[in-house]
Image: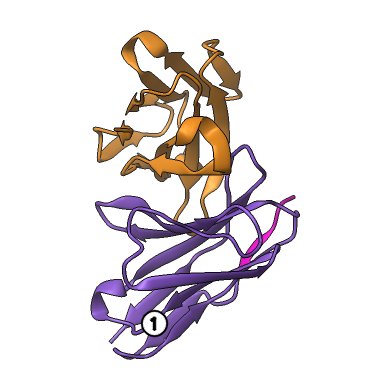
Amino acid sequence: AQKVTQAQTEISVVEKEDVTLDCVYETRDTTYYLFWYKQPPSGELVFLIRRNSFDEQNEISGRYSWNFQKSTSSFNFTITASQVVDSAVYFCALSRHGGSQGNLIFGKGTKLSVKP
Amino acid sequence: DVKVTQSSRYLVKRTGEKVFLECVQDMDHENMFWYRQDPGLGLRLIYFSYDVKMKEKGDIPEGYSVSREKKERFSLILESASTNQTSMYLCASSPRTPPLHFGNGTRLTVT
């Protein structure tokens, strides 16, 4: 069975703190993709990053960084020096069927609140 | 930029009504999807389509049907709306390989 677990339901931090959002996945596919999406209060899901199963290099984009570890089936997301605008629900997702047909399984999301 | 447009942002319908949710994408994507989002349950896939006139059931297809007559348009149909179908409905599109690009969502209330 394929599954995505985001154990943290809600996280609250103060501005400028670093915060890590956890994502653990289960799949028997050897080829797959992992994703992170952001859903701000406006409601639209915004794509942040895609990682394929053959690329375990960490990625950094500004204040965002992602740590992919196949050995622990984790794909964690860190925000450095958080800002109020980072407040949103963040979803981790896994491709089904190795990525064919674009079908994704989503975790239940982590709600991040960044207080000034 | 990819644009996925859902015809209504908010919709209120009565129990038993037939409801149509429309979605249009402008990027010539092969795949289109309908998800439903509920608090504590995340996003759950209702139906998806990987080509015109093709459709596949997702995880929770009961009570829903879909139509894809043109590549850019994917409609979700609630044959007889019920209160447990009150939810946020999200349409998405993608090329053969994801990521998915989402619309703004339609918040449907069935009374």
Looking at the picture, how far across and down is residue B57, in whole percent?
Answer: 42, 57
Q: Is residue B53 above or below residue A21?
A: below
Q: Total number of numbered labels?
A: 1
For disc 1, the marked residue is B79
Which quarter of the figure is the C terminus of chain B placed in?
Answer: bottom left
Looking at the picture, how far across and down is residue A6, in whole percent?
Answer: 29, 34
Report the magenta residues as a range: B1-5
Asked which secondary structure carries label 1, the reply is loop
Q: In which chain is the residue bearing label 1?
A: B
Between A33 and A109, the one lying in front of the other is A33
Q: Residue at x 46, y 78 (%)?
A: B10
Q: Is residue B3 magenta?
A: yes
Quadrant of the rendered structure where residue B65 is?
Answer: bottom left
Q: Amino acid at mark 1?
A: Glu
Looking at the picture, how far across and down is residue A12, in whole percent?
Answer: 29, 38
* Colour of the chain lettered B: purple
